[in-house]
Amino acid sequence: MTIAGTMRTHPMAGKMPRVMWLLNHGAARRFEIPMLKACGFNEIFLPKNYPADPSFRSASVDFSEDQHLTIPSRDLAILNEADWYGDPGREVWSIANRHFSLIFFIVQSRETLEGVSRHFKGTAVWRAYGLDRTLTYSKVRKHFTGGLRNLENMGDRFWFGEAYKDLSEVEEEFIRKRAVYLPLGLPSLKIDDQWNGGDKRVFFVCPDLGFNPYYRKIYEDFKRDFSGLPYVIGGSQPIAVKDPNVLGFVSNEVHERNMRDLRAMFYHSREPRHVHFHPFEAVRAGMPLIFMADGMLDKLGGEDLPGRARSVAEARAKLLKLLQGDTRLADEIRQSQTKLLDAMKTDRLEQVWRDNLSQLVGQLQVGKTRPNNASPRKRRIAVIIPVGYRGGTLRAAKLLAMAISLGGVQAGEPAEVVLVHLDDPSVYSSHDWADLPTSIDIRSFRWRAIEAAEALRTMRYAGHSEWEPEFAKYLVMEDGIQELGDCDLWVVVSDRLSLPLLPLRPKILMIFDYLQRHYRITDLEEQILVTNRGADHILVTTEFARQDALQYAGVEASRITKVPMLAPERGNAARIQGIEKSHFLWTTNLGEHKNHMRALAALQLYYEIYGGRLECHVTGVGTDRILKSQLPHLQGLARTIAGSRVLKQMVKFVGELSEASYRQKLSTAAFLWHPAELDNGTFSVIEAAHYGVPSLSSDYPAMREIEEQFKLGLNFMDQGDPDHMAAQLHAMEINLVERERAVVAAEQLASQSIDCLAPEYWKVVREFI
């Protein structure tokens, strides 16, 4: 629908709201900013940055409106630095919300749509100037969002601001219903008739020939249809074109001279919902315009003009007459074509703008004063453990849930957090969740695979009207409560999914490592990459993992955030004193990256060459059956143990311990040993530090990052060299007192507590709810 009315006074008494006009198109700005001011909007923010993209060839920056803004200079400086075509960030949006109630925007990226729909609290107008017949704004939205809901969440605060009547007739229902007519005009319609036509060539404007296939075809068609006629091609050409008739970029002075001197302009477009500025420039300059029928110029009054051509042959014939000096035809065209400017006249358009914007502002005022007695519903966030993780990953998932919950409380935005795990009694029991605060709910689920047809129906019922399936099957989570549909955001701990997850809600992946890049550990590698690229955002805890996300998973940098590593806190942790330390602890599992064979070789050297006196207690998921494992990388482990009397005597495989048993064994250990080859680091060295237990660790990037964050006083070894590993084990034993003194102080560990780090997690999560 198009809003119209008879209101001539603004519904808001006193000062009109400030406006953000988030476009950089120079010609549109020269018309629309004066129009907004004529409608009573005197404080207007203009963006100061735009992409280095050839499609912004008509863009420019204007600071002139800053002087009229009555907002703090510091806030203005931040707004001026922001990227309004990408992701300015929630803090920038909060400044915008503080000072502005109405924005005009165009969609250049996924981040634009997400930012407006998630963060802006006022009225938002998607400014639409028309597209070629192969595109619609609905398709643009679908391209950037995959057809998922976004602007619908704004409800009646969103409008589709069409610059020409009925642009919305080809759009999806939601956009059609939210259409408001705000016609585009020209900043000046004064006829400056200095045309002389002394240059006997046709002027044809066609930019971006070197890389844009749409304009390249138009150019090729023009050369074919008008071969033999003299011509020049105007328009910016970021990539040079090998055609002496292509002018490329010219100054305003040269452009005006071309309008004055060239014999005629030809305008090719038959697009029903888009028109360029240069035909109107020609009319204003008094230059004869030959244009094709059935395009936007017909709708603007061109159907009965002598410059109109129903076919290429007719257009060619008229251009040939003009080139041959037919002054009668030239005069007929020049005198009649000014009709095209009538629809662009400011005095005819101002009342339409005034009426329609008055109603938008009136609705904005109603929204501000509408009583809201109901308390806003708390947002609910699901932290999902997608497979039967135990050990460090399970602890990490619980810490993540706690950080999100605590971060929301600290920010004054408390959210309900639900920890969701597989419904598998053989993996989890109620005891596994006993250490979580009561504020975090626990819920179980089962995976169910659905076909594409059912996925489409499910997404339609959820309101995603433009979503289409890309895959044959999808995963949904059967939790007994609308497939987790009661949650506003899903945070999935890892990317190990066998099929794509149906995107009923925004999803963040918490990725601790990309080990599959370095080891053959899964048959799901291709699906894992699909999962990463389909996520709304990725969280990692090390720069090493962030680089893997960029280089291996192919995720854009803007969709990755490195957050600090969370570690278990042991407030009552204490080193048991007064007993002789008889063992050190090796925490591991059955993964290939755990470096078992080199570690065992180092142990053999430690005992047989260095006379090591400390037992090695091996703990972790699966370690009680490690010697019986048939995994290829563990072949030979049992034989090595069996062939060494000292290894059989000194190495104890104790399996996965309960939390209490593990803490007891850790607190009495001489030190902790971490000989893994490569991963995203381990909590175990941090937990050891809480007990004053020193650690000897492999030397790889993630462990160096842990040392940098926590300042643990780690000792490092070369995990690829068993001789060096054995020597360092011996050094730990004989220098134990010194190594204990070097362990990080409790105050430093406290600075890395969940209380301190939770805001970093909430800052990311809140962007998606």
Image: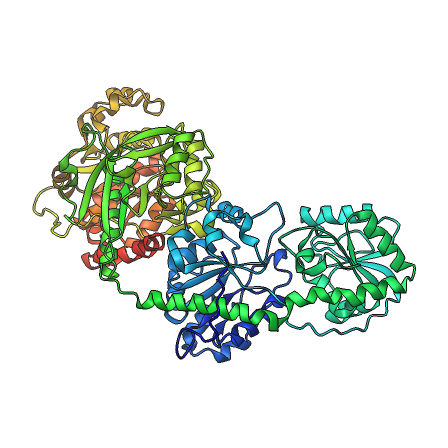
Residue 582 visible in the current orientation: no
Hey, which residue is sitting farthest left in the picture? 578
Direction from residue 583 to residue 715 in the image, left or right: right
Q: Is residue 158 visible?
A: yes
Please identify the quarter of the rendering in which residue 505 is found: top left
Q: Residue furthest front?
A: 6
> What x and y, as percent, mark residue 431?
13, 37
Q: How is the image coloured?
A: rainbow
Q: Quadrant for residue 53, please give it.
A: bottom right
Residue 569 location, x and y as percent?
Answer: 19, 50
How many numbered marks appear?
A: 0
Q: Left or right: 191 with respect to 462?
A: right
In depth, the one of 109 and 740 nearer the eye is: 109
Residue visible at 60% across and 66% down?
Answer: 28
Q: Foreground: 667 or 236?
A: 236
Residue drawn at 50 percent across, 80 percent down: 67
Q: Is residue 11 above or below residue 87?
A: below
Q: Residue furthest right?
A: 324
The residue under the point 54% across, 74% down is: 63
Is residue 192 shown above or below 209?
A: below
- Between 645 and 387, the residue placed more toward the observer is 387
- Residue at (67, 59) in percent of width and height: 276
Quarter of the figure with residue 59: bottom right
Q: Position of residue 10 (x, y in %)?
A: 44, 74
**In this view, 492 is above or below 379:** above
- x%, y% of residue 477? 30, 35
